[in-house]
Amino acid sequence: MKRASVNRGLFLRNLLFLLVLSLSTTSACAQAARDYEPRVGQAGKDVVWVPTPDELVEKMLDLANVTASDYVIDLGSGDGRTVITAAKRGAQAHGIEYNPEMVELSKRNAAIEKISARATFAKEDLFESDFSKATVITMFLLPQINLKLRPKLLDLKPGTRIVSNSFTMGRRKSRGFGSWPKAN
Ligand SMILES: C[S@@+](CC[C@H](N)C(=O)[O-])C[C@H]1O[C@@H](n2cnc3c(N)ncnc32)[C@H](O)[C@@H]1O
């Protein structure tokens, strides 16, 4: 009888210890996620992360004439800056990003700006994602990735505007180029 109650006491003590351990591990993980800081040039699935400067984000959205009636999708959305800026212009905006930590960072950034309802993010491979709802596509990828994406982009609704930072899409004719920074 006495041994049974000692065993039960030991069992409860061990259970409590495991509970405390798991709670502190969970909160350490949550803290690590909040502290995540991306490095420029860090590896990505097909393209490394290099952020578009804020001023150029605005320029890209100007080039696409983004308005509140648009559905903007950024392919490889990084820290979410293009999506958040488009959402601040009133558009519905969505980011597709492969790196889950960047997706969480983007969601936190959108929450800080109180724009989460219009700026959404998904952890997806852009080659396997559906972006047919877009009226505007923004991207900062690489020439060979742009070419590989071309069939999907050509399948988009007529009138969809596509703005690519730095890289073209082969010989396809463009409606216009913007230069940045502006030449003096
Ligand atoms: C050059 S960064 C551009 C980030 C952001 N669009 C901007 O302009 O600031 C390219 C981004 O694409 C993401 N990426 C690379 N390959 C991807 C893939 N197959 N699917 C989704 N995202 C991808 C990288 O993780 C990185 O964040």
Image: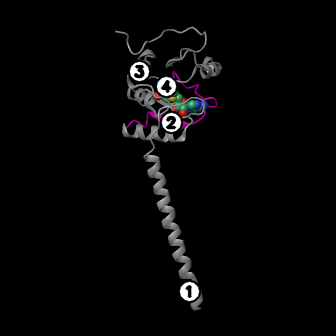
Residue at which label 3 appears: 56
**Label 2 crowd bin: few (<14), some (14–19), many (20+), radius 10 Å:** many
Disc on the earlier residue, 1 or 3: 1
- The mark found on residue 112 in the picture is none
Disc on the earlier residue, 2 or 4: 4
Q: Does the magenta run of residues contain 36? A: no
Q: Is mark 2 within 8 Å of ligand 1?
A: no
Nearer to us of marks 4 and 1 is 1
Residue occupying image coordinates x 54% and y 14%: 159
Residue occupying image coordinates x 57% and y 36%: 98
The alpha-carbon separation of the residues under discs 4 and 1 comes to 65 Å
Nearer to us of marks 2 and 1 is 1
Residue at which label 1 appears: 5
- The quadrant where residue 145 appears: top right
On the image, the x and y values in percent for residue 139 come to: 52, 23
Above or below, comparing residue 183 to residue 113 in the picture: above
Range of residues picked out in magenta: 114-138
Element carrying mark 4: strand
The alpha-carbon separation of the residues under discs 3 and 4 comes to 19 Å
Q: Main secondary structure of the magenta part?
A: loop
Q: Nearer the viewer, residue 161 or 19?
A: 19
